[in-house]
Amino acid sequence: MTEQDIDRIAQGYRAFVDEARPTSPLYARLAEHAAGSPTVLEFLAALPTGKRQPNLLLGALQFLGGAPGDGAELDRRITDDAERLRATMLTRATQTNEPARCGALLPVLAQLEGPLTLIEVGASAGLCLYPDRYGYDYDGVQVGPSDSLRIRVETSGAVPVPAAVPEVVARIGVDLNPLDPADPGDRAWLRALVWPGPVADERLRRLDAAAQVAAAEPATLLRGDLVDRLPDALGFAAPGSTVVVLHTAVLPYVPGDVRARFAETVAGLPVRWLAQEPAGMVPGTGERPADGWGNEFVVSLDRRPLARSAPHGGRLEWLGDGLGASPA
C-alpha cells in the first residue's frame, strides 16, 4: 500500500465530512478524525478497495457496539476489535433501506396504468417495494392505509398527490446481498446503517414498521448483479401488469461502466424506469441547478426529470414541466 493510496482513502473520508455534517454531526467528527488517524487509515488500507467506505466502517462499528463517541474511542475500537470489525466489513455491505423514499415515488407510480409489477434493483431488504402498503401525509392530505406506517412529505410545486395508492401485484428485488426483513441479524444491520443524529429515532421507528410489513408479505429477492439479474427478475412479473424497474440511492455505488450497461439494458426491456438518484446518475438528469438543494436527489421516469427530493425522503419539489404538473 503506497502513500498515495493512503491519501486517497483520507480524501474520501474528508469528503464524507461535508456529506454527514447536516444530519449526523457525530459521523462528521469521526470521519474528520479518521482522515488524519494512522490507526484508522492503516486498518482501512488492508481492506479491499470496495470495503473502505465511511458508511461501511461506521455502520460496522454501530453494529458491533454502537457508534464511538469521539476520535479516541474510534482508534481504540479499531485497535481492540480489529478482527471482528474486519470480518463484519468483509461480509456486510452498505445497503441503507429508507422506506420514506416511497413518498417521492408514489406520485409517479399512481399515474401509471395498473396493476403494477415492481422490480427494485439494489433492493437491500426490499422495503421500497411496498409503496401501496404504507400511509402518506402530503402537507396534510392523507393517502393510503390509515393503520400502517405513515410517511410525511413536505411538498412544493404542482405535486400530483394521488387520491389512492396504486395496485401492486408483484414485488421483485435484486441485490448483491439481499437481506431478509424477518431475520433479526439482517434487521440489526439495517438499523446500524442509520446515521446517529436528530432524526435517527424517527428513521429507526420507520425502518422497524416497514420491516414488519415486508416480513408479513415477502417479496421475491434475487441475489446478483443489477445488470445480469434484471432479465431474470422480469420473469417473475405478473401477466398483464405494467412493469416498473425502480431504484433509490443505488447508482453512486455502481461503477460508471456498469451504470452505462444498466441504462442500456433497461432501455431494451418493456418496462418503465423510475429512479430517485443524485443528479447526473441517470442520463438526462444532470442539467438542473441545485437552487440550494446541494444534496438533492432527482426523481425521473424513463430518464425524464420530474421532481427533486431530499435524499431520505420528507421533501418533494415537483418541476414545472414534470409529469402531471399544472401548466405554468
Image (cartoon, helix red, strand yellow):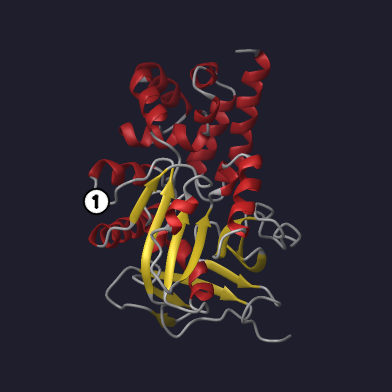
Amino acid found under the numbered disc labelled 1:
Ala
In the image, residue 30 above or below residue 127: above
* Of residues 315 and 212, the one drawn nearer to the viewer in this rendering: 212
Residue 62 x, y percent position in the rendering? 36, 36
Q: Judge whether residue 200 can be spotted in this image.
A: yes
Which image quarter: residue 233? bottom left
Q: Residue at 49% across / 29% down in the picture?
A: 51
Q: Quadrant of the N terminus?
A: top right
**Camera-side residue of 246 and 321:** 246
- Horizontal relation, residue 302 to residue 189: left or right: right
Q: Position of residue 179 (x, y in %)?
A: 34, 46
Residue labelled with disc 1: 182
Q: Position of residue 164 (x, y in %)?
A: 41, 83
Q: On the picture, is 260 further left or further right than 45?
A: right
Please tell me which residue is depicted at 27% across the width and 75% down the height of the picture.
147
Q: Where in the figure is residue 282, as x and y percent of width and height?
A: 65, 55
